[in-house]
Image (tube, rainbow, N blue to C red):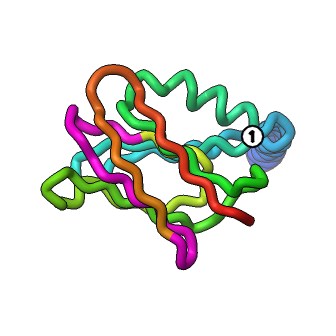
Amino acid sequence: MTENKKCRWVGSGLLVIVLILSLYSMASGALFIEQGERNGVAYATGGIGLEEREAMEKMAGNYSLKVELAATSGSYLADIKVCITDMGGKKVFEYSTSDPWLYVDLAAGTYKITASFKQESRMQEVKVDTGLKTVMFHWKR
């Protein structure tokens, strides 16, 4: 076998493996959990589908606040802006998400969480101390 034929054979084999792995990933419900940091505050967002929710529940211990966002009908909403301020009015965290769950790792304290969808804003106050605190925001749709 010539060197050129070996390269083609190996390249074709790798292509087949990549295609199989891609199809498996799509069929198994690939997770699209985003994790990052904004202004020194760690966050994770996701929760679309059972597998993502289960994966996020496993990582919940790394965060102090869970924000749930949805329509009262249970459907998902897109482009929800979440802004968290401390009690002095200083913006601590801000993020726009299309996912129903947002985890944020805040230091202990009391915060105002504002969630805005289209022209409708909702605000809740939460005291973060020990364990995971959960706030829920729902819009009629």
Quarter of the image containing the C terminus? bottom right
Determine crowd level at label 1: few under 14, some 14-19, many 20+ residues with C-alpha closer than 10 A: few
Q: Is residue 108 magenta?
A: yes
Q: Is residue 128 above or below residue 33?
A: above
Residue 98, picture quadrant: bottom right
**Image height of 136 relative to 80, above or below:** above
Residue 114 in view in this figure:
yes
> Residue at the location (70% across, 63% down)?
140
- Decide: is 42 above or below 114: above
Residue 124: within the magenta?
A: no
> On the image, numbered disc 1 is attached to which residue?
49
User: What percent of the width, then of the height, locates residue 111?
Assistant: 27, 47
Q: Residue at x 23, y 60 (%)?
A: 91
| Highlighted range, magenta | 104-120
The location of residue 86, given as percent across then percent down, is 20, 51
Q: Overall secondary structure of the magenta stretch?
A: strand
Front residue of this view, candidates 64 and 45? 64
Q: Residue at x 36, y 31 (%)?
A: 64
> Which of the 4 image quadrants contains residue 43?
top left
Expressed as whole percent of the image width and height from the top left, the position of residue 116 reads 49, 67
- Give the quarter of the figure containing the N terminus: top right
Question: What is the secondary structure assignment of the residue under circle 1?
Answer: loop
